[in-house]
Structures are given as structure tokens and as C-alpha cells.
Image (tube, grey):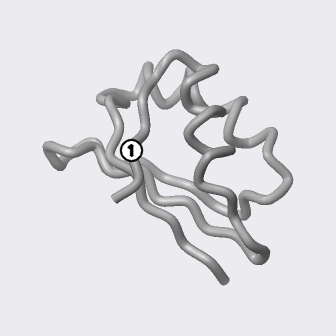
């Protein structure tokens, strides 16, 4: 299993609702979550296969948010 973490500007439940269809649409993503209680709003992505950090960043960007690899 591979895990990637990103610092984001996804800060609330509404933001999570907006990004959900984008991240759920990625076949490579097994599970994801955003810790909105931390200042860096960490997005954790898990996959059974290799993950492309750039693909995750672009997907989050399409949803209207930013993600930087941690």
C-alpha cells in the first residue's frame, strides 16, 4: 500500500464535499481523508498501487483547491 500526504487549503466540510467526486473518481485511490483540525489541512491518500503525486495535485486543482506534497 502506498500513502501520500499533501498540505491543502481544504478547510471545511463544504470543501470536502466539493472535492469528493474528483478524488473518488480516481481509480488509483483506495481511501482518502483531510484532517481539517490541523493548520496544514493534511490530505492523506492511500492506494494499493503506485500513486502519481502530480495527478493528485491536478485533481485537487480541478476541484478548486491547492495541494502541495508534504
Q: How many marks?
A: 1
Does residue 57 appear left or right of residue 37 in this picture?
Answer: right
Q: Quadrant of residue 12?
A: top left
- The residue located at (34%, 59%) in the rendering is 70
Q: Residue at x 70, y 31 (%)?
A: 22
Quarter holding residue 41: top left
* Closer-to-camera residue (60/68): 68
Would you call the spot at circle 1 few (<14 residues within 10 Å), some (14-19), or many (20 or more)?
some
Above or below: residue 24 compared with residue 19: below
- Residue 45, horizontal then vertical, whole percent: 56, 60
Q: Which residue is farthest left?
A: 39
Q: Residue furthest bottom?
A: 1
Q: Relative to 67, is 22 on the left or the right?
A: right
Element type where label 1 sits in the image: strand
Q: Looking at the image, which is closer to me, 44 or 70?
A: 70
Residue 22 is left or right of residue 44, and the answer is right
Residue 68 pos. (x, y %): 39, 44
Residue at the spot of label 1: 68
Q: Quadrant of the N terminus?
A: bottom right
Single out the residue that lies furthest toward the front: 54
Q: In the picture, residue 46 is in which quadrant?
A: bottom right
Residue at figure coordinates x 17%, y 49% from the top left: 38
Measuring from the top left, give residue 43's x and y in whole percent.
Answer: 42, 50
> On the picture, is 65 further left or further right than 46?
left
Residue located at (33% from left, 51% from top): 42
| Residue at far right of view | 27
Amino acid at each position: 500500500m502506498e500513502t501520500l500526504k499533501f498540505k491543502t487549503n481544504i478547510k471545511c466540510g463544504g470543501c470536502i464535499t466539493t472535492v469528493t467526486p474528483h478524488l473518488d473518481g480516481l481509480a488509483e485511490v483506495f481511501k482518502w481523508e483531510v484532517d481539517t483540525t490541523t493548520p496544514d489541512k493534511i490530505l492523506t491518500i492511500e492506494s494499493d498501487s503506485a500513486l502519481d503525486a502530480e495527478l493528485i495535485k491536478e485533481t485537487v486543482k480541478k476541484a478548486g483547491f491547492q495541494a502541495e506534497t508534504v
